[in-house]
Amino acid sequence: MPIELSDRVQTVPPSGIRRFFEIAEERDDVISLGVGEPDFATPWAARDAAIASLEAGKTSYTANRGKRELREKISDYVADRFELGYDPAEEIIATAGASEAVDLAFRALVDPGDTVAIAQPSYISYEPGVIFAGGEVLSVPTREADEFKLTAEGLEVAGAADADLLVLCYPNNPTGAIMSEAELEPIAEFAREHDLTVLSDEIYAELTYDGEHTSIATLEGMRERTIVFNGFSKAHAMTGLRLGYALGPSAAINAMNKIHQYTMLSAPTTAQHAAIAALDSCANDVVEMVDQYDRRRQFVLSRFREIGLDVFEAEGAFYCFPEVPEGWTAEEFAEDVLREQGVAVVPGDVFGAGGEGHLRVSYATGLGDLRKALNRIEAFVDEHV
């Protein structure tokens, strides 16, 4: 008798991003502007701490929630940078990447049949995470006319007043949109009025180029109904070390830790030592990386405009979100430019409602490759448009 797969797993399609990289692997001249991963190496202070921890034989499990020293460092960091105050003993958990933290939150908070509203386009793992937890997804599209910012009107029209949870990601993957304190206020009011729990993915918080990042958890009445996700993958270039964290009310963090201790046990020990050093000694490295991302951002935006493609003015993360020319779907354009010019980008529709007609283009790669890739896209457009 063949193995029977669960309905939940069969409901979720394979990653739309991975399919493009399987095509890209067929040739060796591809320039990838698709993966959301820094091209920088992890700063040396963090690497040295990781190496030293291995040489000292510090390879055992840590506390389920993560090393106390790390949680204290995280508490100080988020208080200083984002005005977030959390008790390291009860309100912070270290996880195997921010993605694990998001998954833990879904499993801890979502009962079968619960509705989770997701502001889209957004990171591709939210919707499957809700489905795996037994919940139902409510898409809340954002529009380029609103600069891809979530609005209370958009929530109302989508029916989010009847949802149980709301998922946000600002700075946004894939659009690069950000939301100011004034723009978050109506969202907070909507959440309070309709008793929504908010899951706020702020992994790109340090990558905010015009103004300072504001967490919705700092707004009136929101701390007690919000879980904030962050980590070391993006700003500290530690993707492979797999270390994230969640901040929230103790009841929620305790519930997440209950699942975590039965599944992951603890976040990677070596990565925790690296993260402590990153928070202690790598602030200048982060500033330098962000400065370079900003220079790349401005270059990519200007080149797309020279090519003649409309492009949203991204203000955060390390993505831009140009429109495809009339006559193509996003998927068709991405496939054609990959096959003809060897440039890998991701069609916007894989990120959910509101993404069709756009491409996610990552500028987390060197200016040399960015120049070559944009020149190839220009040649493609000149030939076909």
Image: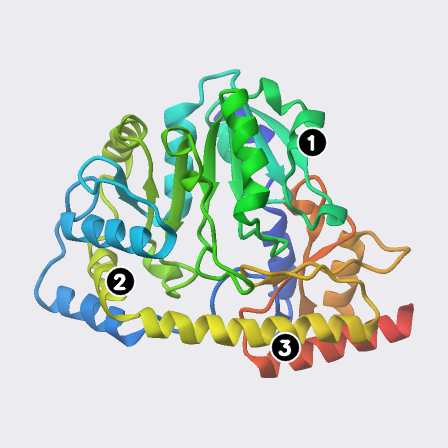
Q: SS class of the residue under badge 1?
A: helix
Say which mark, if any, is on residue 370: 3
- Residue 132 versus residue 310 in the image, above or below: above
Q: Residue 244 at what x, y percent from top left?
A: 34, 50
Q: Which is more foreground, mark 3 or mark 1?
A: 1
Residue 122 left/right relative to 45: right
Task: Name which residue type carries label 2.
Answer: Leu
Report if residue 283 is visible in the image. yes
| Residue 294 picture location, percent across and down | 55, 72
- Residue placed under numbered mark 1 in the picture: 153
Residue corresponding to mark 2? 279
The tag earlier along the polypeptide, 3 or 2, is: 2
Answer yes or no: do the residues labelled 3 and 2 have beta carbons within 8 Å? no
- Residue 363, percent across and down? 59, 69
Of the pair 68 and 185, the residue shown nearer to us: 185
- Amino acid type at circle 3 is Leu
